[in-house]
Amino acid sequence: MTEVSTLFEEFEEKYPSAITEMSLNRGDFLIRKGQVERYTYFILSGAVAVKLFKESESHTIRFGYQGSFLNSIPSFFDNSPSYFDIVALRKTKVKAFAKKSLYELIESNESYKVVYISVLENLITHFVEREIDLLASSPAKRYERVLERSPQLFNEVPLKYIADYLRMSPETLSRLRKS
């Protein structure tokens, strides 16, 4: 992750006007469904959820918490309207890095291109792991996989949101954590 940190430190030096610091209260949105994503966010403190709303229900598909980067990925890459909302789960501070300037920096240096490709590879791996989690036959197996892969998640995100992410009730998650 040090290469990624170096990339964003360089970004802050070269493009300070392309960075916005934001403070969010619980329930505030970084982006809403239908908007076009123009930023990559770095979570300084707090936690956010990437949520997909279908009809009368919502599904948590990803989290961001201290030290993580995220955005509405398809919208960021192809300028389409976002399928997702990104909402603060509690008081959260983020840095928003403008896409246009970020791409300019990445294109300016071969080593930054390598870092960017590495980030994308890790992201794809994360999505495959998430798919495997969703296909796991039991709630216990889904819980074990996420706990193994992301133990910090349980310190950063309220359990009711983790239960939604794992496609189980909060009561089921509570029982699994006790066993």
Image (cartoon, rainbow, N blue to C red):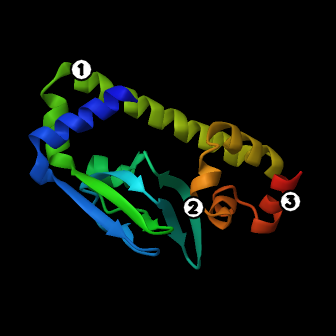
Where does residue 71 sit, x and y in percent of width and height? 37, 53
- Report the residue that reaches farthest toward the right: 179
Circle 1 packing at 10 Å, graded few (<14), some (14-19), many (20+), is few
Taking the spot 53% from the left edge, 41% from the top edge, the residue there is: 127
Taking the spot 11% from the left edge, 44% from the top edge, the residue there is: 15
Q: Amino acid at mark 3?
A: Arg
Circle 3 packing at 10 Å, graded few (<14), some (14-19), many (20+), is few
Q: Is residue 140 visible?
A: yes
Q: Which residue is mark 1?
A: 111
Q: Amino acid at mark 2?
A: Thr
Q: Which residue is mark 2?
A: 60
| Residue 105 horizontal side relative to residue 175, left or right | left
The answer to whether 105 is drawn above or below residue 61 in the figure is above
Q: Give the foreground label among 1 and 2.
A: 1
Q: Secondary structure at mark 1?
A: helix
Q: Secondary structure at mark 2?
A: strand
Where does residue 4 sit, x and y in percent of width and height? 33, 32
Q: Which residue is mark 3?
A: 175
- Locate residue 136: give its quadrant: top right
* Distance CA(mark 1)–CA(mark 3): 47 Å
Q: Which tag, 1 or 3, sits closer to the chain's start?
A: 1
Q: Secondary structure at mark 3?
A: helix
Where does residue 119 sit, x and y in percent of width and height? 38, 32
